Amino acid sequence: MSERVMAIAEKLSEKGLLGPAAHRFGSPDKVMLVSGGPVTHLAEWSLIAAPATKRVVIRQPSREELPAAEHHSPIGGDVRLVEETALLLAEVEEWKHGSWYHSVTLRTLGLEDLFEKLKVETATVPFALKHGVGLPDGPFWSGALAYDLVQWTQPLRLQNPPKEGALLAVLWCITAGVVVDHRTDTPCVFGDEGDWVKQASTCLDWTGEKVAISPLGSYEETVTHTNQTHENNVKAVRQGIVDGQVYQVNIGKHWRGEIDHPYAVFQRLVRNNPAPFSAYAYAEDLGFALASSSPESLLSFDGKRLTTSPIKGTCPQDHDDTEAARLRGRMIEDEKERAEHRMLVDLMRNDLSQIAVPGSVFVNRFDVESYANVQHLVSHITATIRSNASGASALQALFPGGSITGCPRTMVCAVIDELEQTPRSFWTGSIGYIDVHTGRSAWNILIRTLEAHAVGSRWRASVGAGGGITIASVPKKEVEEAAWKGGALRVAAGWMAQEQAPLPSGALGIHPLQPPATVRIGKDIGTVRDLEEVVNNNLACGVLFVDNLDSFSLNITDAIAQEGHDVTVLRGRSPRSQKWLDEPVLVDLLKQLKPSHIVLGPGPGRPEDVPLTMMIARGALAGRISAPLLGVCLGHQALALADGRSVQPSPLGPVHGVPVDILNTGTGLFSGMNAVLKLTRYNSLVALDRGSHCLVVNATESSSGLIMGVHHPSLPIHGVQFHPESIGSHEGQHLIANFLSIPSDG
């Protein structure tokens, strides 16, 4: 179906309606969103945008405005957070007299603020000619966002930031174009009546011919990381997992070389490696282009419901359907693949919860998606957006995607910077569109993507590829997987002959699996607020949740809200939390808040890395804090350490994203529950020492005997090593309900 799209684009170019010859209508820049593969819920339409007359360009600030972070080692546990960063400067340009001219500079605080400020630059008049697909009904913005915008979506400064002036984003205002509806195999022109629309309407006929693509040349390639360096990075991540600093990290590298032209590369990709979220972006005067055959969606928002579709889990494709099915089956049953995917689902549920109505986040699909060369495990997670949120705030919350960063996300973004030692640029960023007035939007993740820059009359390009590293990762296999994932792009670029690339080919399709069951107990839904909002507005605290920089924290607050309780979030590792580390000040805060319950949340690192959590744990055990208290994972370890137990790396190694059998005594939080429960672990460290302590062990892992739960015999203090909020913890909501049923007076 993408052949029709490419044929129409060719006719538009021949008639001077697209590209350099279209200067009388607008710029020679190009924006194309092309859905390849079978017509499904993923691939319904494609867009060829008309020449734009307005765009936004964002570049990396100077070192004076945004200095690089001092050298430190996040993988070793030294993560340095910032509360405020530099302004993000967006240059709005207009096409006049055959050139782009500066119009205005927008000084913004990040992606959400950028799109809010673009409202004044964007007309609200609906299109006279409608398109009939999921695109906005009036002028909208489309373009590309670099991964390095992480500097404005995570509380971090990079040690290896882009060079001053490096491109961070290019966005075009789309006021007309051609859409091909793949559901009906029908093209149409949309926008306002005008010469371009009239002439473009004559370019829609197609008799099935294929566009001629320029012959593929042969070029040399280099790589940013040797195989040995890549292996060393994998080993460093695995050690970081053992130490409890990270759970999973996506590590990659770049191949670089000369190409013939980025559009020719894109044509080859569309034909040979079709994907539902393919895209091409080109800015002639900037000497910049992206050619993407991405299979992954970061988010889509229809004005009410938000969907993200993370990919994690990969296996080869095969031309033989029986063998392809066998490979799928092996991936589906593989514990490493399922655990990694479960971890990502839990992470994205957390990220959605930043802007979703509590209790509205669901996994509504779980599929294997088969492409030309690979097959992937894919979940589709939906949420109802809050009334005070938008498609822009959703992008701010989810960017960059969890599938190409890891978990916990803030920590792993710092680790990626440390280990890769070079900016990612647009690889693992996004291409998509947004209506700044309604928030309707859709963004891909820029994997399977080539980035190109003009050097004189030639083009130099880079291709990034990598994979998610877990404790079960084998360094040499991870190196092979990265090369395999980058193979189709490297062949299309002319850097590697087809016969050199181990690229199995098979049929495209979607193979539905059973999504995880969702437990809902509570009827009334509570609210989730930050501490500053509660204190400044003198609101009731409800449950106090101490966030320790985990990527599952908001899943816990969501589970609490589902039980009808309001939640106040205290950022335990934020620089602003340092003021609470004086015990009298903390005591005064708790007296002011009067929390009904306190939850010490999970997070990376050791209990000693979260002094606020340790202070609360010690205060509770000493009887100075009377509210019922629950420690989850790191919070549980803090309670154990405060109780005199040792906290050490698990003698059997880390476990992340794996449901295990938990034996319990039926006491404390386990009252009224089955003696054996299936609950999900995310931990590298464990509390050891079964000697005489205040806290009594009431849950252990069945296979290892490791401590999984403790409680105080007389005080309302409980700790669990597992994660009750995980999608893999089917009885976890009941445990949370049991904790919240404890009277707030203890």
Image (cartoon, rainbow, N blue to C red):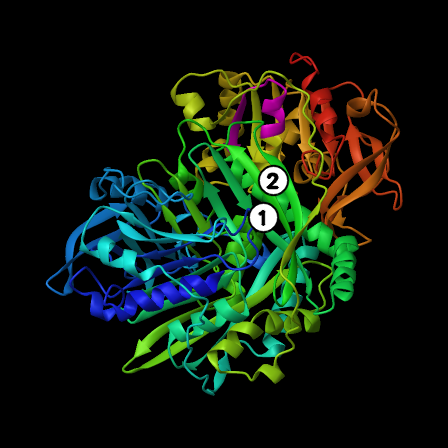
Instruction: Write the residue at 46% across / 65% down.
Output: 3
Q: Is residue 491 magenta?
A: no
Is 205 placed left or right of 106 in the picture?
A: right
Quadrant where the C terminus is found in the figure = top right
Which stretch did the figure color magenta?
558-571
Instruction: Give the residue number, with chain letter if any, for mark 1.
Output: 408
Gap in Å between the C-alphas at discs 1 and 2? 8 Å
Q: Amino acid at mark 1?
A: Pro
Q: Is residue 568 magenta?
A: yes
In this rendering, the answer to whether 636 lies above or below 218 is: above
Q: Quadrant of residue 393?
A: top left
> Within 10 angstroms of label 1, few (less than 14), some, or many (20 or more) residues?
many
Residue 139 coordinates in the image, percent (x, y): 27, 44
Secondary structure type for disc 1 = loop
Q: Quadrant of residue 676?
A: top right
Is 127 placed left or right of 312 in the picture?
A: left
Instruction: Write the residue at 78% across / 50% down.
Output: 650
Residue 656 coordinates in the image, percent (x, y): 71, 49
* Mark 1 or mark 2: whose residue is earlier in sequence: 1
Instruction: Give the residue number, with chain letter if any, for mark 2.
Output: 552
> Within 10 angstroms of label 2, few (less than 14), some, or many (20 or more) residues?
many
In this rendering, the answer to whether 308 lies above or below 60 is: above
Q: Amino acid at mark 2?
A: Phe
Residue 430 visible to an observer of this rendering: yes
Instruction: Write the residue at 79% across / 61% down.
Output: 326
Is 77 placed left or right of 652 in the picture?
A: left
